[in-house]
Image (spheres, grey):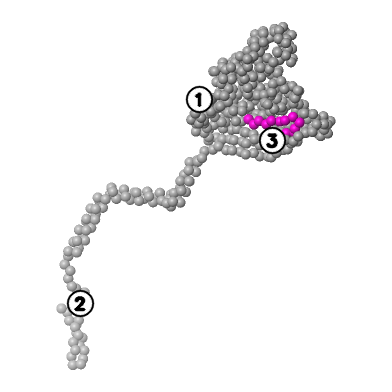
Amino acid sequence: MELATNISRSSVTNLPIDEIVNLIKQLGNQYDSNFIMDKNHFEVDKLLMDYYKGSYDITEVMKNLSPQCLTMLLKCKLHGTDRNCSQLFKFRKTQDGFCCTFNYVRERDDIPTMSDVFKAKQNRVHTVDKLGIGHGLTVVMEPFLDDYFYPILPVKGWKIIVFHPYDYPDVSSGGVTEVLVMPGTETYLDMTPTSFFSTDIIEKFSVNQRNCIFAEEIRTSGTTYTYSDCIVDCKINDVLKLCKCRPFYYPRRGEKEYAQRICTNKDLPCLGKYKSKWWTVFPHESKEEILPNSTWALHCHDCYPACDDTGYDVLSSMSYMSSGEYKTDLLWNYNITDQGVLHVFFSKYGTIRLKQDVIYYWYELLSDIGGICGVFIGFSFISIVELLYFLVLILLDLFCGKSSLEEDDDQEKETKSIHSQTIQTIYWNELLPRSWQSVTFFNNGQFSNNRARY
């Protein structure tokens, strides 16, 4: 209404304020979830160009038309201590436009020069030291039920997006969890992280073999590589190729990206035509034959998951709040009508930690081969020595067989010569010397012992 009033007072149009408001409402079609073409989508673009006297920054217009954090976030507590919501939450770009983001620690959305990209100071990361609802983040939110000028969803309330602090929240990258929070409810989000890391030896393999990319290997629109940024860059490049513009909710970093034209409502026919293509993403591991119409999809061949990453699973629960005045520590003397309370916390220490490593090291593979051979054929290192021994004997027999045959022939001849000699009978008396032979005579009953020599 404020923008419509200013346009009406500027005398650039004769339209009444109500019709100007209806034209401004068509700017909602710029959101990625819509891209709806309307018969008046050209008129609002012409109206804004007349009001701003030429080209205008639609990003700043959309930012001013979005619900502001200062009025939407009524009370905040972190680690059990009351905190200023404007210090905890920043107004940043997401796939749903501008949102109030907490613990989003990457560089700011729009950086004019590449030197500023690397000099950009990141926000401080908030960590959790204790478990439970009282030591997490608690926010009291105002729904503005009478001011739903352009609702993106067909429900009233808030959309809570949970994503990695260093990633741009892109739903198609698979790293975003969405939870709807209704007015008049107290919602609890129990966070469970899952960590994934790769060993140093994985880095020696090619990207196609390990199917992941380390943070410092490739730079995307941010300072380091993330899978979400790679998908977003792939989308942006395809949008620029087909529609010659860049949607307002995507960040810009560097001279080249900063100079790109931002899409306005006159680009809605092109954005609407290819909307389904940008929502169907085929990363590196996808095959074109998975879907018969995969040609009408976005193929991001260079986008691999990060080798070191952390994801978050969310378990949500809800309880309804009755209207009236509360006397709790959070809502002391607070009159609840349709406000909502959100609790984000961790309920347990530790996390699932997934490790990517090689399947077998060389010594493990050698040990497995030896074990398998030992089970089936009694194989061991001693068997190797025995095989070598017998192999040497066979080789010696092959190369030295001739000399051995000659020796055998000589031995056989000698044996035959011995067997060919004459064999004669030898009597026992021939064994004694002749000088010791004697004869005994018996004469008339007396023995006469005379020695005779022959």
Q: Nearer the viewer, mark 2 or mark 1?
A: 1
Residue that numbered label 1 is attached to: 295
Residue drawn 68% across and 14% down?
A: 23
**Label number found at residue 316:** 3
Q: Are marks 3 and 2 in contact (CB under 8 Å)?
A: no
**Among the two numbered marks 3 and 2 on one chain, the one whose residue lies closer to the N terminus:** 3
Frontmost residue, 181 versus 203: 181
Find residue 21 and report its horizontal and vertical position in percent: 71, 15
Find residue 26 and report its horizontal and vertical position in percent: 66, 17
Residue drawn 57% across and 17% down?
A: 270
**Is 385 inside the magenta-drawn segment?**
no
Q: Residues within 10 Å of mark 2 (few under 14, many from 20)?
A: few
- Residue 268 placement: quadrant: top right
Q: Disc 1 to disc 3, how far (Cα)?
A: 38 Å
For this view, does 218 lie left or right of residue 387?
Answer: right
Residue drawn 44% across and 49% down?
A: 373
Residue type, label 3: Ser
Residue range (magenta): 176-187
